Structure formats: C-alpha cells, structure tokens
Image: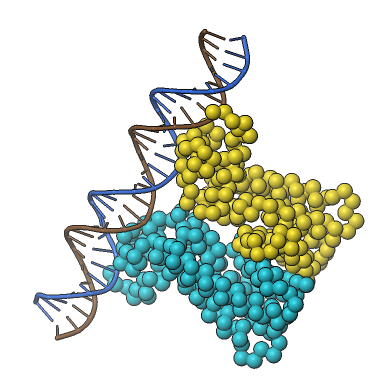
Chain colours: A yellow, B cyan, C blue, D brown
Amino acid sequence: MKTPTRNRRAEILDAAAALFAARGFHGVSIEDIGAAVGVSGPALYRHFSGKEALLTEMLLGISERLREQGARLATTADPDTAEAALDALLAGHIEFALRHPALIRVQERELDNVPEQARRAIRRLQRLYAEEWVAVLAELHPDCPQARLRAAAHAVFGLLNSTPHSAGELSPEAMAGLLHTMARAALCQIA
Amino acid sequence: MKTPTRNRRAEILDAAAALFAARGFHGVSIEDIGAAVGVSGPALYRHFSGKEALLTEMLLGISERLREQGARLATTADPDTAEAALDALLAGHIEFALRHPALIRVQERELDNVPEQARRAIRRLQRLYAEEWVAVLAELHPDCPQARLRAAAHAVFGLLNSTPHSAGELSPEAMAGLLHTMARAALCQIA
DNA sequence: GGAGCAAGTTAACGATGACTAACATTCCAG
DNA sequence: CTGGAATGTTAGTCATCGTTAACTTGCTCC
C-alpha cells in the first residue's frame, strides 16, 4: 500500500487549498481533507501538527513564493526602464493568479485564521512584496506620495486577483492580456 | 428594559456584518452576535429564523441595494454620453465600498454559505448589476466582445472592492479619487 | 387590571469536529 | 529475521455551537 507517494505533504496541501478556496477554512473538516487525498481523517496528523499548522504552511508558502518572484523580477538583469520592471511584475503576478486561483483565494481570505505569530511573518512577506511594486512605481511617479503608491498597488492586486471570481469566460491568454492592459493603464494614470 | 430599540433587526444585521467581515461566517457564533448587541445568545431567534437566514438577508440586502443603485445611476436623467453614466456608476460603487467596507467583504466572501435557493437569487441580482456596467461599457467599446467586457467589469469590481484591504492609509476622499482615476483608466484601455 | 404579545433569560439536546490513543501494516537496515 | 520507523486505521474524548424548550417580564389595549 505504498504507491509512489509523490510526497504526501504536497498532495495534502494541494487538496486542502482547493477545499479551503471552495468552502473556507472553517467550512472544511480534517476528515474532508483526508478524504480528498484518499486517506481518512486523523492520518493527516502524521504530516501536520494540526489544521491551523496546515493553513499556516500554505500561506507562508504562497507569500514566500510571491516575494521571491517579486524580488527576482523587479531587479531583473538590466532594468533599463522602470516600465520593463513593472511589466515583469505584472506578468509574473498574472501568471501566478491564473495558474493558482485557489491559492490566491485562500491567501486573500484566510489570513485571520492563522495564529498570531505566523500571521505576522506572512504579513511581513506580503509587505515586502508590495514594497517591490511601490519601489518600481516610485520610479515612474517620482512626486507621488508613498501612501498613494501603496494604495494603488493594493488596488491593482485587487484587480489582478479578481481572476477566481470571473472564471472561464475568457481563455487564459486573453484574460492575461486583458488584466495586463487594464492594470498597466490604471497604474500609469495615478497623478 | 425597552430602550428605544431603534429596530433590533437592523442593529443585529450591522453587528453581524462587522463580525462576519472580521472572522468569517463560520468563525462567528450566534452567542458572539448576541453579545455584540447586548443580548445573549438565543435571543436572536426572536428576529431571525437562524444563522443562515441572517446571512441570507444580509447578502440579499446588499445585492438589492447595489442593483437598485446601478439601475438608477446607469439610466441617469439625461446620459448624453456613456462616459457620464460610467462616471456615475464608478462614483456610486466607490462611495458604497468606502462607506460599508464590511458589507463589501461579506458579499465577496460568504456567498457559499447561503442556502442554494437564496444563493441563486443573490447571484441574479449581482448579474443584473454587472449587466448595467456591461451595457455602459458596450456603448464605449462597440466592437469589444461581451465576454471581454464582462471580465473587465469584474476586474474593476476587484479593484474597487480592494478598499477593505488597504484601510486608512489615505483619506476617504483621496482614496475615492484614486480609485476613480485608476478604474476609469483601466476601463478606457480595453481594446 | 388582566389578557396577550414581544422580547429576553437560562438550561438542555444533538451534531459536528478537532484531536488523541491504541492498535495494524509495510518497508527497509543491520 | 527482526526491530523500528513511517504511515495508516478505528474508536473515543472533549469542546463548541446551532437550535429548541420552558419560563419570565414589561407594554399595550380593551
């Protein structure tokens, strides 16, 4: 009974992400998650210390991944223009959002269900990611106050993360193009 | 013990909205909601038939309000230009989102916790509201396919509804102006 | 002034669900 | 071969929570 087991932890995290996205953290039971990966109930405690720990690891993973990607793309090899950096950030975020809508949804909705300490760590990563955007935007709009740039960045995150809501009407490529265009236009207009 | 009682139902709905926004539907107990309005626990059953019914009424109220506002603003007195109608829709939505961030949050997150039948009604109202936007956008972009316009509208809702995330950095007026500018720019660029 | 309704109260029930305990199986390592 | 880790299983515990029941209390209207 020991199939390849392409790492159970990852399998569990994926299944849990889909379930959390669909029904919310409190709307999903440990039993549900177990059933989704073909084991039943308390088997999960062999891999995670509890339900909150599972969510915590999930959110930390997402934030870390975005932050790493942001740091990499914002300081891309030779960013002659801030415009190029912005396009890279946009493309990266859009690709992530389109490829992992469930993760985006969970990241947006379930932060409050993570224990205090880990929540601070997650928020820190999110802040670092946002600061990459703000830095790039500051180059494009040198006399725009930081607070306004931060608000603009968060607004654009809202736009890009709307993906899970409007699922499937457009092809992924068309959707990516549309979001890129809209976000770019929105970010170039901030006085 | 019969203070003015400025309608308990409304009071309960407000308190529940704030709690649901903060901790999610399943994260809030009937006891919590009661405590928030100064009565304890099962007193709520004098006003609502259950927890789901409470959420249902809340979401129906929000959707109805937005739809009504949308219908009113989109067909405003004399809409010489579709641009004016779009500006009216934007201003209305932004005002609502800034004035009632908790309602926006609940509307975005808790639809799945509403029983099937009511959920369909809510979705219908949301669809009607979105169609107001699509109709106006169609005037501005006559040869843009409907699906793209719909996706654009939802993306802008994501942008405007990001308010609850980035709370308080900017003054409400500055925030309203920024959101209006960004959304307008985003919506004028869709090829 | 008492009938009746509106709006609370506390106590209890029943379900669900997170987590623990105790026990089984498979897979190597020595 | 054997013992021990890794990974499951089922049964049970304990807390929480939605909901109902039974009982109180004040207001209002004839």
- Of residues D15 and A92, the one nearer the viewer is A92
Left/right placement of residue A111 relative to residue A151 reads: left
In terms of depth relative to the viewer, which is nearer, B141 or A54? B141
Q: Nearer the viewer, residue A148 or B140?
A: B140
Does B97 sit above or below residue A43? below
Quadrant in the rendering for residue B166: bottom right
Residue B185: give x, y in percent of width and height. 75, 73
Residue at screen point 36% across, 62% down: B50
Residue A44: give x, y in percent of width and height. Answer: 51, 36
Q: Position of residue B20 (x, y in %)?
A: 48, 60
A134 lies above or below B69: above
Quadrant of the rendering where the N terminus of chain B is positioned = bottom left
- Where in the figure is residue B189, as x and y percent of width and height? 77, 72
Identify the image quadrant of residue B161: bottom right
B187 displayed left or right of B96: right
Residue at 60% x, 44% y is A14
